[in-house]
Image (spheres, rainbow, N blue to C red):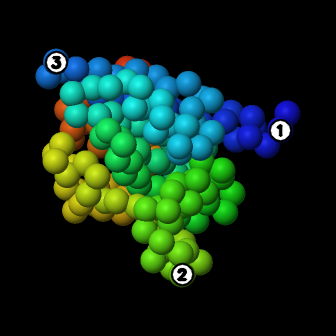
Amino acid sequence: MDETTTQLDDVDLAVAAYRQGGRWVVQEVTLEHCEDVELLADALRRLGGDTGAIGLVSVDEDFFVIVRVEGERTRVLLSDASAAEDWDLAETVIDLLDEIDPDDLDERDERDEDEPAGDLGLLADLGVSEDALEELLDDPDAYPDEVLSDVARLIGFGEQFDDVAGLASA
């Protein structure tokens, strides 16, 4: 088994959500689309949706990635920048962030361990402010899947997310 397959086996959950006709549609994302952030973004783009789509991925109870696509625009958040040292998906998020803002290249090695990387405001228009997301990220006892469940709840598709992800609703 190669390293990529092993890493994909460590994906705890991968969920896509999008609005269709004013209602949230939530579905599982295949593991193959979690290999890197570009594959995930492409899969989300194919879903369409009224205002794009959101991907929520939790890996090895260690970190999560949120990807939001709106047309050709891709916005990402990695819960723990240090995960890029060990995980291909996290590394591709950092690479994408560097493409979006090349000025960050110098800062790549200076990112604090356990600090998030990316756009904390990517869900602000959906009801999850930067402050709310930071507060969720600051909880040292919360597992990544729990944080993503809380994010989904704040946006308005928490029960659907929990059902698709196989989590017990709070």
Task: Please name the residue that numbered disc 2 is placed on.
Answer: 106
Between the residue at mark 1 and the residue at mark 2, the CA separation in whole angstroms equals 32 Å
Q: Secondary structure at mark 1?
A: loop
Q: Is residue 129 above or below residue 159?
A: below
Q: Residue at x 74, y 40 (%)?
A: 4
Instruction: Between label 1 and label 2, give the one nearer the viewer.
Output: 2
- Pick the quarter of the image with the N terminus: top right
Q: Give the x, y percent position of residue 29.
A: 49, 26
Q: Nearer the viewer, residue 44 or 123?
A: 44
Q: Is residue 40 left or right of residue 156?
A: right
Q: Residue at x 48, y 34 (%)?
A: 42
Task: Please name the residue that numbered disc 3 is placed on.
Answer: 21
Instruction: Say whether disc 2 or disc 3 marks the residue closer to the N-terminus.
Output: 3
Q: Is residue 25 left or right of residue 41?
A: left
Q: Residue furthest right?
A: 1
Between the residue at mark 2 and the residue at mark 3, the CA separation in whole angstroms equals 43 Å
Q: Give the x, y percent position of residue 32.
A: 62, 29
Query: What residue type is disc 1 on?
Result: Asp
Label 1 with label 3: CB-CB less than 8 Å: no
Q: Secondary structure at mark 3?
A: loop
Mark identifier at residue 2: 1
